[in-house]
Amino acid sequence: MSIAGLSALAFVSSACDVGGISPIFPEPVSPNGRAIYDTYIGISILGVIVFVGVEAALLWVAIRYRRTRQPAGYLPPQVHGHTGLEITWTVIPLVIVLAIAAYSFVELQQNFQPISNQQMTVIISGHQFGWNYDYGNGVVVHQEQNIDGKVEPFVVPTHTLVKLQFRAVDVIHSWWVPAISGKTDAVPGYDNFSWLKIDRVGQWRGECAELCGTGHAAMQIIVQAMDQSDFDAWMARQKASASPSASPSP
Ligand SMILES: [Cu+2]
């Protein structure tokens, strides 16, 4: 299939949401997803300005000073070792790169902190090959290896600040739902943190972003946000099915 065909396919696929294929990041639904999206767009704009500026200067010099327009044996002005130029084209890129680094660092600090003002906490544990979501009340959602799209959703209430605590039991995995949050590594031996606060009802897809073994591609993620009342009903159903021992066992 041609490149054009592939990109057309990507656009068509992005139209049916929940789908993970998108030529750019999907529309963010959580403030940290929004911050990462804005960082990406901001850095891209700066990159495009630099690219267009450098290419335009290159073309202008190549056309304006081409050999056929110069007298025979013409030698252009020699600027090798020009201190002013050397300093200028060292300092300008340095300032741009440092500004991008500082901006990105501040964003990362905000999006991957162990927050303390959360309304609920979920411990997300990665394993080969799936995710467990422990709500801390006996309810655990299991997202197991699956590539046919039938993924058990990780359910959260809307407008609720949820602290996410990441762990892994075997190798390093990485939890990534582009519309919601940046990639967060789930590492055996210590905890990483992120959070989410989804502003609308819906479902968003993600996947493990760290090559973790043969079932890596099947570590699909679906996050589903519900209104608080729907979430409470969902949680009640989960609790009921999590404790079937209400009936006496022989
Ligand atoms: Cu994984």
Image (cartoon, rainbow, N blue to C red):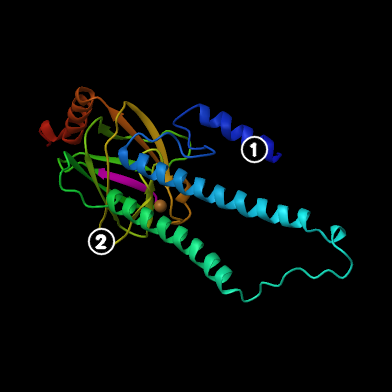
State the residue at coordinates (35%, 43%). Answer: 35
**Which one is nearer the viewer's eye here, 93 or 239?**
93
State whether residue 167 is above or below residue 10: below
Where disc 2 sits, the SS reads loop
- Residue that lies at the very extreme toward the bottom in this rendered image: 81
Which mark is first along the chain, 2 or 1?
1
- Assign the magenta stretch its main secondary structure: strand
- Whether residue 220 is visible here, answered yes or no, is no
Residue designated by label 1:
6
State the residue at coordinates (55%, 70%). Answer: 84
**Image coords of residue 224 (percent x, y):** 33, 32
**How many numbered dots are placed on residues in this image?**
2
**Image coords of residue 127 (percent x, y):** 35, 53
State the residue at coordinates (39%, 38%). Answer: 179
Report the disc number at residue 190.
2
Q: On the rendered structure, is 184 left or right of 214?
A: left
Where disc 1 sits, the SS reads helix
Q: On the rendered structure, is 25 left or right of 246?
A: right
State whether residue 78 is above or below residue 7: below
Q: On the rendered structure, is 122 left or right of 19?
A: left
- Mark 1 or mark 2, whichever is nearer to me: 1
Query: What range is drawn magenta here?
Result: 129-133
**Image coords of residue 69 (percent x, y):** 85, 57
**Which one is nearer the viewer's eye here, 241 or 83?**
83
